[in-house]
Image: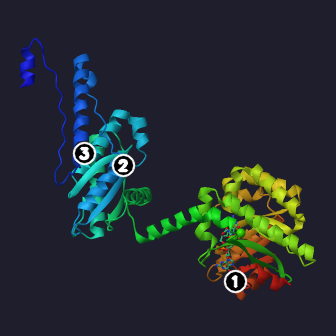
């Protein structure tokens, strides 16, 4: 009516309208509904003003769907869960587009916006959807009603829906690649706080990128792994202060004399509750956070202290092999300085130290590792290449390596030694001998392995056939 009036009026009346709809399948809190309607009203107002001022072709641009704030999302989740009478089952979904910034960069912002709005519209049409919103950047959140459906069926429906959306985007827009990832969090516990729901689903959204189907559910295993991760990260500093970390010794036996020649130092975490944690379960997490740096120095200092104490008591000394985490190669000068300082502090003679650097660390940091090897060589300290042959090096790197010792990866000895396995080991030994490397084999578990390795000239052997890693006191008893 106003438009008709304005066509002939001397004083046209301006107006703007904003609305949104809350219905069973697309549910809003009343405050959010008002806010969105209000935003849309202003959007309409701006649009009309621009329309008055500019030529028609310049204002055909789409606006990106509004995003929901974390606070509003938490409130919404709270309301949905609080209003549930227990008969309904829900799932919270978090979806994103792989490498969305590349679409923006290559096809332009407008195409990017259109694609995001299209995906949102498709998500709104997903059956039994209670609520859908853009969360931030290219991430969408949704709550769906899954009452009576098996989890496998829910997952299958989401995979199919993502496939269909992808297909339609590829057909409607110029892009030639699109991939959607969805994390599913089943809302089984109605009391769970909103931020936990958001954080758990975010974890599986990221994990979904590694899945062929692009969808990942938050399972009990993931929950336990996350708990352990959080526990490790939050308790590490305190545990280090409380000396919960212990060094274990695993003897290395000389090939010819069959006597203990040295030992590898392996760390263990003696948790306050009595559990003993093995390095593979916590080192990767500490490597990610960088805190392994402090742990390595702690291990070195404890090992040096042990050597210094024995020397003071006039007891027999043995060379110790120490593992070097890859994080040190990011700041190699700090590492060499810190280790030199510890060596001086405890007055450790160089022949009692061997640093082990894994083949993978070497391949990813060749220059820094070589720098470190040169530094330690000046101090007459030996360096060993750990896990040799585990899959990272190629034969041409062998001609340049500065390592003194090569520790053949235990995978070569896993299972029974086959004829082919023996030939490969013989030829590796041959190559290493000719380039003057000291050969150590780890993971030696049977007499048959010992006989073969000794006959082939392996310099030192380490493995359960002889000894498992043991506590300091046991090792001291063993070597006297
Ligand atoms: P790694 O350096 O390859 O150490 C050898 C691992 O093989 C040890 O596991 C040892 O217990 C195990 N092992 C020894 N003999 C046998 C055998 O006969 N059969 C089998 N199947 N396994 C054997 P562990 O102690 O669990 O250590 C795992 C890894 O954690 C080590 O692998 C090393 O990479 C890392 N690590 C341990 N302590 C430290 C540390 O203080 N600092 C750093 N940066 N890494 C450490
Ligand atoms: Ca090692
Ligand atoms: Ca190893």
Which residue does the numbered mark 3 point to in the structure image? 31
Which residue does the numbered mark 1 point to in the structure image? 464
Residue 302: name its quadrant: bottom right
For label 1, count other residues whose C-alpha is less than 10 Å away and answer few (under 14), some (14-19) or many (20+).
some
In front here: 325 or 291?
Answer: 291
CB under 8 Å between discs 2 and 3: no
Rendered view: 61 above or below 49: below
Distance, label 1 to label 3, CA atoms, is 66 Å
SS class, disc 3: helix
State the quadrant of the N terminus: top left
Left or right placement of residue 40 versus residue 365 in this view: left
CB under 8 Å between discs 1 and 2: no
Residue 358: name its quadrant: bottom right
Left or right placement of residue 51 versus residue 437 in this view: left
The residue most toward the bottom is 447
Which residue does the numbered mark 2 point to in the structure image? 71
Distance, label 1 to label 2, CA atoms, is 55 Å
Choose mark 1 or mark 2, whichever is in front.
Answer: 2
Q: Which residue is drawn at 21% across and 24% down?
A: 48
Distance, label 2 to label 3, CA atoms, is 13 Å
Q: Residue at x 57, y 62 (%)?
A: 234
How many marks are shown on the rendered structure? 3
SS class, disc 2: helix
SS class, disc 1: loop
Q: Which residue is drawn at 29% across and 40% down?
A: 65
In front here: 212 or 288?
Answer: 288
The picture places residue 70, in percent across and down from the top left corner, at: 37, 49
Res 421 visible: yes
Mark 1 within 8 Å of ligand 1, using the beta carbon: yes
The picture places residue 445, in percent across and down from the top left corner, at: 68, 84
Quadrant of the rendered image holding ligand 1:
bottom right
């Amino acid at each position: 009516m106003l438009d008709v009036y304005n066509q002939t009026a001397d004083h046209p009346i301006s107006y703007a309208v904003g609305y949104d709809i809350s219905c069973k399948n697309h549910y809003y809190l009343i405050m959010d509904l008002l806010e969105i309607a209000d935003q849309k009203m202003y959007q309409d107002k701006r649009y009309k003003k621009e329309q008055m001022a500019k030529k028609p072709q310049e204002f055909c641009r789409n606006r990106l769907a509004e995003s929901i704030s974390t606070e509003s999302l938490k409130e919404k989740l709270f309301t949905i869960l609080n209003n549930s009478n227990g008969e309904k089952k829900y799932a919270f979904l978090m979806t994103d587009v792989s490498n969305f910034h590349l679409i923006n960069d290559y096809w332009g912002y407008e195409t990017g916006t259109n694609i995001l709005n299209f995906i949102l519209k498709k998500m709104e049409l997903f059956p039994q959807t209670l609520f859908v919103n853009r969360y931030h950047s290219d991430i969408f959140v949704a709550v769906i009603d899954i009452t009576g459906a098996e989890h496998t069926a829910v997952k299958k429906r989401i995979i199919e829906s993502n496939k269909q959306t992808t297909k339609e985007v590829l057909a409607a827009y110029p892009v030639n690649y699109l991939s959607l990832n969805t994390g599913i969090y089943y809302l089984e516990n109605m009391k769970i706080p909103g931020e936990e729901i958001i954080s758990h689903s975010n974890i599986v959204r990221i994990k979904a990128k590694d899945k062929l189907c692009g969808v990942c559910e938050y399972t009990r295993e993931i929950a336990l792994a996350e708990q352990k991760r959080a526990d490790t990260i939050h308790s590490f500093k305190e545990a280090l202060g409380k000396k919960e970390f212990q060094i274990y010794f695993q003897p290395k036996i000389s090939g010819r004399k069959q006597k203990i020649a040295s030992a590898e130092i392996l760390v263990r975490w003696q948790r306050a509750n009595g559990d003993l944690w093995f390095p593979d379960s916590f080192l990767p997490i500490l490597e990610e956070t960088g805190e392994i740096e402090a742990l390595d120095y702690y291990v070195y200092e404890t090992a040096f202290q042990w050597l210094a104490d024995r020397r003071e008591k006039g007891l027999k000394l043995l060379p110790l092999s120490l593992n070097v985490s890859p994080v040190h190669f990011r700041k190699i000068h700090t590492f060499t300085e810190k280790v030199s300082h510890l060596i001086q502090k405890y007055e450790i003679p160089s022949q009692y130290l061997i640093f082990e650097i894994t083949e993978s660390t070497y391949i990813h940091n060749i220059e820094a590792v070589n720098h470190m090897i040169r530094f330690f060589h000046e101090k007459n300290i030996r360096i060993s290449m750990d896990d040799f042959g585990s899959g990272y090096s190629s034969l041409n790197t062998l001609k340049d390596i500065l390592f003194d010792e090569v520790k053949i990866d235990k995978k070569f000895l896993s299972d029974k030694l086959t004829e082919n396995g023996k030939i490969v080991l013989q030829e590796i030994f041959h190559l290493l001998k000719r380039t003057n490397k000291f050969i150590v084999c780890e993971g030696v578990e049977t007499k048959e392995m010992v006989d073969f390795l000794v006959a082939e000239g392996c310099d030192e052997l380490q493995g359960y056939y002889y000894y498992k890693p043991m506590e300091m006191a046991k090792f001291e008893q063993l070597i006297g």
